[in-house]
């Protein structure tokens, strides 16, 4: 969240992509860092031991949401 918020504050659209176990932590950090609306997209956990096919499926499921978050200002 720290890097993403730094880029957002400096006019560079970003989106944090993380597994859903980090939803609460991302919300707390975004608020603490002064940008509670910082864009974030969550995918199902786990990530670490996912196969390539599972990772592709997770990415395919959120790609439109990520694009929307990155182009929200344009």
Image (cartoon, rainbow, N blue to C red):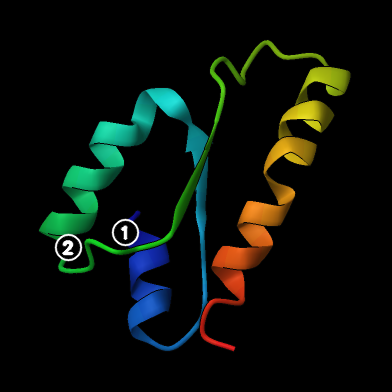
Q: Nearer the viewer, residue 18 or 37?
A: 37
- Mark 2 neighbour class, 10 Å CA radius: few under 14, some 14 to 19, many 20 or more: some
- Mark 1 neighbour class, 10 Å CA radius: few under 14, some 14 to 19, many 20 or more: few
Give the structural element (helix, strand or loop) at label 2: loop
Question: Please, which residue is most extreme toward the right here?
Answer: 53
Q: Which residue is disc 1 drawn over?
A: 2
> Which residue is rendered at x = 34% and y = 63% of the image?
38
Q: CA distance from mark 2 to mark 1?
A: 7 Å
Q: Which residue is disc 2 drawn over?
A: 33
> Which residue is rendered at x = 34% and y = 73% of the image?
6
Q: Name the spot of residue 71 as percent of width and height, x first.
A: 61, 77
Q: Name the spot of residue 4 as percent of width and height, x first.
A: 42, 64
> Which residue is rendered at x = 63% and y = 56% of the image?
66
Q: Is residue 65 above or below residue 57?
A: below
Counting the numbered discs, the total is 2
What quarter of the picture does the C terminus occupy?
Answer: bottom right
**64 on left or right of 46:** right
Q: Name the spot of residue 33 as percent of width and height, x first.
A: 17, 62
Labels 2 & 1 near each other (Cβ < 8 A): yes
Q: Is residue 26 above or below residue 72?
A: above
Give the structural element (helix, strand or loop) at label 1: helix
Which numbered marker is on residue 22?
A: none
The image quadrant of residue 61 is top right
Q: Nearer the viewer, residue 46 or 48?
A: 46
Q: Nearer the viewer, residue 66 or 29?
A: 66
Q: Name the spot of residue 24 as percent of width and height, x first.
A: 25, 33
């Amino acid at each position: 969240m720290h890097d993403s918020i730094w880029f957002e504050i400096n006019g560079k659209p970003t989106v944090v992509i993380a597994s859903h176990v980090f939803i609460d932590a991302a919300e707390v950090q975004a608020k603490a860092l002064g940008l509670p609306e910082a864009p974030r997209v969550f995918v199902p956990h786990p990530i670490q031991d996912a196969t390539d096919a599972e990772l592709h499926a997770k990415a395919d499921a959120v790609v439109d949401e990520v694009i929307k978050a990155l182009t929200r200002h344009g």
